[in-house]
Image (cartoon, helix red, strand yellow):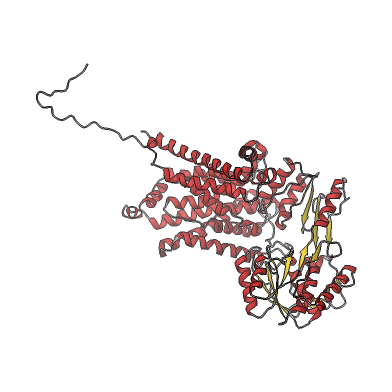
């Protein structure tokens, strides 16, 4: 076995890409008249430097872990789903509808579980619809899931501005707020909400499901070659629907967390781009759920440093987007280098061909 | 006194983290988080956690006994400027049709639409204002479409309440119709058609607060009031300098109304006022001053406005 070269290849390429991204960002900073090393220092300090500031990174990373799964899971089945934002919004709506009905009738833990399930089912069905359109009607899943985002956001605006509006929310229409008692709190000793744990657990489960179970194997097979999978008798349709449901339910859970841990009600702040951020994370993590955790932390860290770039270095507010853009471009570019660098090539297992029958007078000289 | 700032912060945990970092890292003693969605829950939570830091929010509603003591809210009644701009628009329009591009049917926007319309109708009672809501604060394409369709309908003065009036102003200028600005002076964008505009003037309130903070006054101990409101008189808002198309008559009428609003002899919202469905919203004999909390919950379009707040 020489698969260490493969693992080493992904580690080198990922970290190399991030380093190159940092270098390019440093050039950008230098071009706008800032000392790149001072900027690196600030970014490090504000994103990972101390436990105080690292919590900021964790808070921002939590929703990204969940929304990235909405793209990463179907990708293993060969589907490019980008309906993360819509599924998140639907999850938030599902959560608030159920949460308001439950109120304080159930004990908080039970209420939270029911709300989480509601968010997951709502988000799951939303993406499953895109999967069903793909499987039964051959509608391109990328376009349909993208368009479903707009439908979801319009639905949110309609419900929040109309039927579900709390009349006392004047200039920012919102639904009625959840009772404080059933809100998700922070993890003990931190200011990070429980959503982070949900995200890590979801990524871990997704990893095991895809890499270590027959179900995951079937999904990967169908993703590799759908005709071969059909010939092998795999239920491709069922796989598509289930994987899409699971994907949507992860984004839906992110919506649940935004409502139940952060906003306390559903309003337009649900739709601030966590879904689109998740797409980036999924691609940068090469659709590996465990790598998605790390990538989410990286993006969370970049976002967390946005403030200090503006305040300490007088860089414009778009700087953090430039930073994010550069890093992702390089990471995605590094994807094209897999298998191109000789050092990482698996050494072919060289089997010496059997020696030709020796002809008289040319017997090999055996050294001893 | 030192100022640190951050722009483009979303209304999520990001804003809490920005506030926290300004307090912990930069040592901020007073914060001005301005976006409306920052107030609930983000400012309320942070204010409870940092009782020694003063929080000033633009537009939020301070409620005695409910909102933390170290929170204050400041905002201006810019509908007074809109009323004056409406008079100018009414006297300049030839077709008697005005247009208003609004983001969302929320009280702050409705107040502007209504005041603009009532200003125009105070000088020419047959005038109508067509309103189009784009649904969101920054929808440049819809804003351009709305402005174009207004021009097609024979509307000859448009104004707006969206994040950036640029698209509306430039589109209207291109179509050769008049414009009335919002937020700031946009005469440079529409040099020919710009009449006037309702402008914010934050310099007064901010320098006043900065001075008070410097002398050690605080919201938390009540030496700075929790609710700071003002309009033309207090210098929270103003109107843009008149453009070339404004007649002397219109200038005079507008200046008169402005003077009356400043000395308090003119109240915009007084009975009997009907909405555009014919329902009486303010009964005869009643006058709602700008500070009246009833106005902050406005949910109607007055008579003369064409359109509906939907849903």
The quarter holding residue B117 reads bottom right
Quarter of the figure with the C terminus of chain B: bottom right
Quarter of the figure with the N terminus of chain B: top right
Relative side of A346 to B203, left or right: left
Relative side of A155 to A175, left or right: left
Who's the residue at 68% across and 52% down the image? B7
Who's the residue at 57% across and 47% down the image? A324
The quarter holding residue B264 reads bottom right
Viewer-closest of B108 and B278: B108
Indicate whether A210 appears above or below B203. above
Viewer can see residue A104: yes
Horizontal and vertical percent position of residue B69: 82, 50
- The total of numbered circles placed on residues is 0
Horizontal and vertical percent position of residue A270: 62, 56
Task: Single out the residue that lies furthest toward the left.
Answer: A360
Indicate whether B285 appears above or below A285. below
Viewer-closest of A246 and B246: B246
Horizontal and vertical percent position of residue B186: 72, 65
Horizontal and vertical percent position of residue A294: 54, 41
Viewer-closest of A353 and A21: A21
Viewer can see residue A107: no
Task: Single out the residue that lies furthest toward the top.
Answer: A368
Relative side of A129 to B271, left or right: left
Relative side of B18 to A284, left or right: right
Viewer-closest of A161 and B28: B28
């Amino acid at each position: 076995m020489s698969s260490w070269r493969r693992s080493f290849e992904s580690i080198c390429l990922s970290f190399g890409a991030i380093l190159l991204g940092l270098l390019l960002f440093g050039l950008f900073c230098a071009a706008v008249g800032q000392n790149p090393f001072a900027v690196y220092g600030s970014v490090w300090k504000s994103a990972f430097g101390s436990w105080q500031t690292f919590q900021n990174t964790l808070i921002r990373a939590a929703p990204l872990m969940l929304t990235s799964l909405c793209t990463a899971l179907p990708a293993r089945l060969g589907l490019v789903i980008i309906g993360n934002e819509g599924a998140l919004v639907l999850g938030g709506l599902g959560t608030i509808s159920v949460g308001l009905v439950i109120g304080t009738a159930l004990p908080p833990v039970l209420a939270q579980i029911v709300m989480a399930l509601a968010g997951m089912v709502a988000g799951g069905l939303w993406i499953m619809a895109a999967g069903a359109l793909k499987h039964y009607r051959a509608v391109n899943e990328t376009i349909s899931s993208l368009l479903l985002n707009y439908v979801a956001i319009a639905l949110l605006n309609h419900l929040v501005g109309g039927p579900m509006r709390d009349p006392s929310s004047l200039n920012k229409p919102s639904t009625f707020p959840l009772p404080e008692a059933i809100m998700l709190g922070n993890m003990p000793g931190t200011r990070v909400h429980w959503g982070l744990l949900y995200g890590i657990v979801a990524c871990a489960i997704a990893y095991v499901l895809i890499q270590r179970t027959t179900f995951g194997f079937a999904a990967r097979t169908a993703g590799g070659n759908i005709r071969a999978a059909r010939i092998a008798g795999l239920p491709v349709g069922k796989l598509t629907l289930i994987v899409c449901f699971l994907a949507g339910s992860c984004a839906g859970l992110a919506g649940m967390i935004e409502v139940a841990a952060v906003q306390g009600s559903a309003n337009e702040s649900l739709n601030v781009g966590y879904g689109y951020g998740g797409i980036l994370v999924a691609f940068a993590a090469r659709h590996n759920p465990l790598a998605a955790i790390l990538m989410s932390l990286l993006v969370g860290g970049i976002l967390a440093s946005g403030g200090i770039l503006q305040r300490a270095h007088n860089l414009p507010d778009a700087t953090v987007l430039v930073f994010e853009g550069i890093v992702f471009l390089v990471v995605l570019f590094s994807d094209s280098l897999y298998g191109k660098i000789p050092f990482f090539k698996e050494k072919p297992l060289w089997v010496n061909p059997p020696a030709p029958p020796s002809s008289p007078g040319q017997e090999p000289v055996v050294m001893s | 006194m030192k100022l640190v700032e951050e722009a483009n912060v979303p209304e999520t945990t990001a804003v809490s983290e920005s506030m926290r970092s300004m307090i912990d890292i930069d040592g901020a003693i007073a914060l001005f988080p301005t976006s409306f969605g920052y107030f609930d829950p983000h400012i309320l939570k942070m204010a409870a956690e940092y009782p020694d830091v003063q929080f000033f929010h633009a537009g939020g509603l301070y409620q005695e006994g409910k909102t933390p003591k170290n929170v204050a809210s400041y905002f201006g009644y810019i509908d007074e400027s809109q009323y004056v701009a409406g008079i100018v628009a009414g006297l300049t329009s030839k077709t008697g049709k005005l247009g208003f591009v609004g983001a969302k049917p929320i009280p702050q926007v409705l107040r502007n639409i209504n005041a603009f319309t009532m200003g125009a109708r105070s000088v020419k009672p047959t005038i109508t204002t067509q309103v189009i809501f784009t649904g969101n604060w920054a929808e440049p394409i819809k804003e351009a479409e709305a402005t174009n369709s207004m021009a097609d309908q024979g509307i000859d003065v448009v104004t707006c309440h969206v994040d950036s009036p640029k698209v509306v102003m430039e589109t209207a200028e291109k179509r050769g119709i008049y414009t009335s600005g919002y937020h700031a002076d946009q005469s440079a964008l529409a040099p020919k058609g710009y009449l006037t505009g309702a402008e914010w003037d934050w310099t007064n309130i901010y320098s006043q607060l900065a001075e008070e903070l410097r002398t050690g006054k605080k919201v938390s101990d009540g030496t700075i009031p929790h609710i700071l409101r003002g309009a033309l008189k207090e210098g929270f808002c103003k109107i843009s300098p008149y453009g070339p198309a404004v007649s002397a008559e219109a200038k005079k009428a507008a200046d008169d109304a402005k003077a009356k609003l400043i000395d308090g002899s003119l109240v915009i919202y007084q009975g009997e006022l009907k909405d555009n469905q014919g329902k009486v919203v303010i009964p005869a004999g009643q006058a709602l001053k700008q500070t009246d909390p009833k106005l902050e919950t406005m949910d109607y379009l007055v008579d003369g406005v064409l359109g509906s707040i939907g849903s």
